[in-house]
Image (cartoon, rainbow, N blue to C red):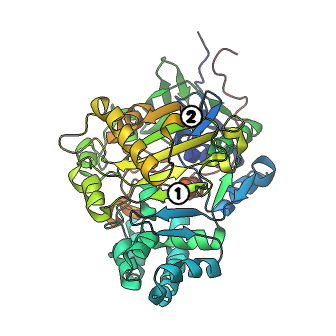
C-alpha cells in the first residue's frame, strides 16, 4: 500500500496539470508551499499537451503564444528565465484568412503591413480600421491589464467598474463594434472572429474582446518550438525544481472537507492527500458537481450550471502527410478557411445546436516552422472546425457522424487549400465533442468551459477563490479572467494574490506512486 500524506500543513494540492494548474503550482511554490499536482493524463499540459503517432507530434490544443511577457513574468516570479527554458519563434505572417470568393487577408506584423492588407481589400475602411485599433488598445489597458490581473470575486469591485463598462459599450458585441468601424464584411470578420479561439460567439460576446487585436499588434504571435507541450514540460520542471511534484496517470475523485474548509483530496485509487490549500484546474462545472458531490453547493449548483451558456465544442482532425514538404507553398503555419454562411453558421453552432452542412476551418501546419513535428520531408497538420456542444436538445451522435464529417472536412481542404491531399495522408487522429467530454471531463464536451458573455465574465464567472468552500481556489479557462493561453496563465496570477504565503514549509515532499 502506497503511503498517503495525512498532514496537510504547508502543503497545496493542484488538481489538473493544464497550463492554469501548472502556472498555479509555480506561483504557490514561489510562495513557499509544498505543491503536488495530480493529473489523470499521461503527460503535463492538459488541453495543451500532445500525442505522438507514426513520427508525427500532434499538438492537441492551443498552438500560439500572443502575450509572451505573461510567461516571462511567471518564470521571473520563480527566479527563473523563461527564454532559457523555452524557445519562442515570432510568426510573420500571423495567419491568412481565405474566403470562398477567392479573396484573402493576411495578418502581419507591423501597422504598415496591416494597412496595406486593409487597403487592398477596402481602401475606404482604412480610417475605421485605425479607430478600431485605438478602441482595441483602450480595451486592452482596461480589460486585460486592469480587470484581468486582479480578482473580481467581490460584487463591489464590479459595481465600481460599471461606468467604464458602459462608456466602452461592453454591452455591444465585438462583431457589432467592428461593424461600426468598417463596412467590408471581410474586414468585419477579420476584426471580430478572435472570440472563437476562446469559445465565444462573436455576435454576442462583449466588445471588450476587441483587445485581442491589440495583443497581436503590440506583442505579436509566437510559436513555441516543441509546441505548447514544450511550455507545459518546462513548467513541470520548474515545479519539481521548487521541491514540488507533478504526478500523471492519477485521478482526483473528490475534494475533502474538514472543519468547514478544503482539507485535501481523495484519489480514485482511495489514497487521501491532505493539504491546507486545494486548487482545482478542472472545469468549474466538474469541480462543483463531481469533485464536490458530497458537499453543499449554494451558487454553482447543477441546475444553474445546466442553465449556463457553454462555449462551442470542436471537431479536430490531426493528420500527417507523406512527402509534402515542397507542396502547397502558399499554405503557411496558420490558415483560416471561411465557409459560405458565416453568421448563419455561428448561430447554428451556438444557438440551435444544429450540425451545419458547411464549415469554417482553422488549419495549423507547424512543420513549416518546427521540423521536429514530422519525419523528414513530411508534414503534420491540425484542422479544427467549431461545432455545437453536447448540451443542446438532440445533440449530434458523433459515433455515427465522425467519419462523415471528417470526409467533408477533407473535401473542403482538397478544394480550397490542399489539392491532392487525399493520397498523401498517413497518420490520422480525430477528436470530437465526445473526446472533450471524456478526456478532459469538460461539461457537454465544451471546448473552452463557460462562454465568455458579459454576464458570464468577471464577477459573474466562477471565482478564483471559491464562493462555496474556504481553502478551495480555481484556475483555468472556466474562471476569471478566462480561456486562451494568456487567460489561463492569468488565472494563476490572480489566484496568487488570494492565497497567502505558506505558514510553514512542509518537512518533505509528498511521496507518490511506487517510490
The answer to whether the residue labelled 1 contacts the one labelled 2, judged by CB atoms less than 8 Å apart, is no
Q: Earlier in the sequence, mark 1 or mark 2?
A: 2
**Whole-percent x, y for residue 105 in the image:** 51, 70
Is 469 placed above or below 489 here?
Answer: above
* C-alpha distance separating marks 1 and 2: 45 Å
On residue 288, the disc is none
**The C terminus sits in image quarter:** top right
Residue 136, above or below 473: below
Q: State which mark lies toward you, 1 or 2.
A: 1
Residue at screen point 31% across, 29% down:
399
Direction top: furthest residue? 1
Label ID, residue 335:
1
281 on left or right of 181: right
Label 1 element class: strand
The answer to whether one can see residue 209 in this image is no
Choose top left, top right, bottom left or bottom right for residue 188.
bottom left
Residue 388 place in picture, x, y as percent: 30, 47
- Residue 463 in the image: state x and y as whole percent: 43, 54
Q: Quick check: 295 left or right of 352?
A: right
Density class for disc 1 (Cα within 10 Å; few <14, some 14-19, many ≥20) is many
* Residue occupied by mark 2: 275
Q: Is residue 221 above or below residue 377?
A: below
* Front-lying residue, 343 or 199: 343
**What residue appears at the point 53 percent right and 72 percent down from the top-left corner?**
213
Nearest the camera: 363 or 202?
A: 363
**Outermost residue, left direction?**
393
What residue do we see at 36% from left, 72% from top?
175
Residue 113 on image: x %, y %? 63, 77
Instruction: Tell me if I can see residue 485 in this picture.
Output: yes
Amino acid at each position: 500500500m502506497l503511503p498517503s500524506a495525512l498532514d496537510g500543513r504547508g502543503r497545496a494540492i493542484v488538481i489538473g496539470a493544464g497550463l492554469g494548474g501548472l502556472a498555479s503550482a509555480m506561483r504557490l511554490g514561489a510562495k513557499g508551499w509544498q505543491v503536488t499536482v495530480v493529473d489523470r493524463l499521461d503527460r503535463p499540459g492538459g488541453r495543451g499537451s500532445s500525442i505522438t503517432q507514426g513520427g508525427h507530434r500532434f499538438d492537441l490544443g492551443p498552438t500560439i503564444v500572443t502575450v509572451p511577457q505573461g510567461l516571462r513574468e511567471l518564470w521571473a516570479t520563480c527566479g527563473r528565465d523563461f527564454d532559457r527554458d523555452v524557445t519562442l519563434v515570432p510568426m510573420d505572417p500571423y495567419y491568412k484568412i481565405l474566403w470562398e470568393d477567392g479573396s484573402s487577408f493576411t495578418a502581419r506584423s507591423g501597422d504598415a503591413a496591416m494597412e496595406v492588407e486593409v487597403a487592398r481589400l477596402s481602401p475606404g475602411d482604412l480610417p475605421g480600421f485605425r479607430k478600431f485599433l485605438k478602441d482595441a488598445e483602450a480595451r486592452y489597458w482596461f480589460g486585460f491589464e486592469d480587470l484581468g490581473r486582479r480578482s473580481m470575486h467581490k460584487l463591489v469591485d464590479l459595481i465600481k467598474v460599471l461606468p467604464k463598462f458602459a462608456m466602452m459599450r461592453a454591452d455591444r458585441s465585438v462583431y457589432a463594434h467592428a461593424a461600426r468601424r468598417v463596412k467590408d464584411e471581410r474586414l468585419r470578420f477579420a476584426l471580430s472572429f478572435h472570440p472563437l479561439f476562446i469559445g465565444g460567439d462573436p455576435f454576442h460576446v462583449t466588445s471588450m474582446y476587441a483587445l485581442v487585436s491589440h495583443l497581436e499588434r503590440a506583442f505579436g504571435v509566437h510559436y513555441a518550438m516543441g509546441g505548447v507541450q514544450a511550455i507545459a514540460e518546462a513548467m513541470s520542471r520548474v515545479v519539481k525544481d521548487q521541491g514540488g511534484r507533478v504526478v500523471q496517470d492519477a485521478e482526483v475523485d473528490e475534494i475533502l472537507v474538514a472543519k468547514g474548509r478544503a482539507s485535501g483530496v481523495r484519489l480514485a485509487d482511495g489514497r487521501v492527500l491532505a493539504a491546507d490549500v486545494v486548487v482545482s484546474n478542472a472545469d468549474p462545472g466538474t469541480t462543483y458537481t463531481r469533485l464536490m458531490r458530497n458537499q453543499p453547493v449554494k451558487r454553482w449548483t447543477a441546475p444553474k450550471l445546466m442553465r449556463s451558456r457553454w462555449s462551442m465544442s470542436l471537431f479536430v482532425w490531426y493528420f500527417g502527410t507523406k512527402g509534402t514538404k515542397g507542396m502547397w507553398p502558399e499554405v503557411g503555419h496558420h490558415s483560416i478557411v471561411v465557409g459560405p454562411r458565416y453568421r448563419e453558421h455561428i448561430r447554428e453552432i451556438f444557438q440551435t445546436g444544429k450540425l451545419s452542412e458547411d464549415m469554417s476551418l482553422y488549419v495549423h501546419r507547424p512543420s513549416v516552422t518546427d521540423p521536429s513535428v514530422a519525419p523528414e520531408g513530411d508534414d503534420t497538420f491540425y484542422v479544427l472546425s467549431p461545432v455545437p456542444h453536447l448540451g443542446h436538445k438532440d445533440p449530434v451522435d458523433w459515433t455515427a457522424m465522425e467519419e462523415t464529417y471528417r470526409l467533408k472536412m477533407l473535401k473542403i481542404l482538397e478544394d480550397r487549400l490542399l489539392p491532392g491531399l487525399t493520397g498523401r495522408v498517413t497518420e490520422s487522429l480525430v477528436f470530437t465533442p465526445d473526446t472533450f467530454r471524456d478526456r478532459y471531463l469538460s461539461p457537454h464536451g465544451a471546448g473552452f468551459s463557460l462562454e465568455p458573455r458579459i454576464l458570464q465574465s468577471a464577477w459573474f464567472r466562477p471565482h478564483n477563490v471559491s464562493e462555496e468552500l474556504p481553502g478551495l481556489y480555481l484556475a483555468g479557462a472556466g474562471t476569471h479572467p478566462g480561456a486562451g493561453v494568456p487567460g489561463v496563465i492569468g488565472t494563476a496570477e490572480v489566484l496568487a494574490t488570494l492565497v497567502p504565503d505558506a505558514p510553514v514549509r512542509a518537512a518533505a515532499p509528498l511521496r507518490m506512486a511506487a517510490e
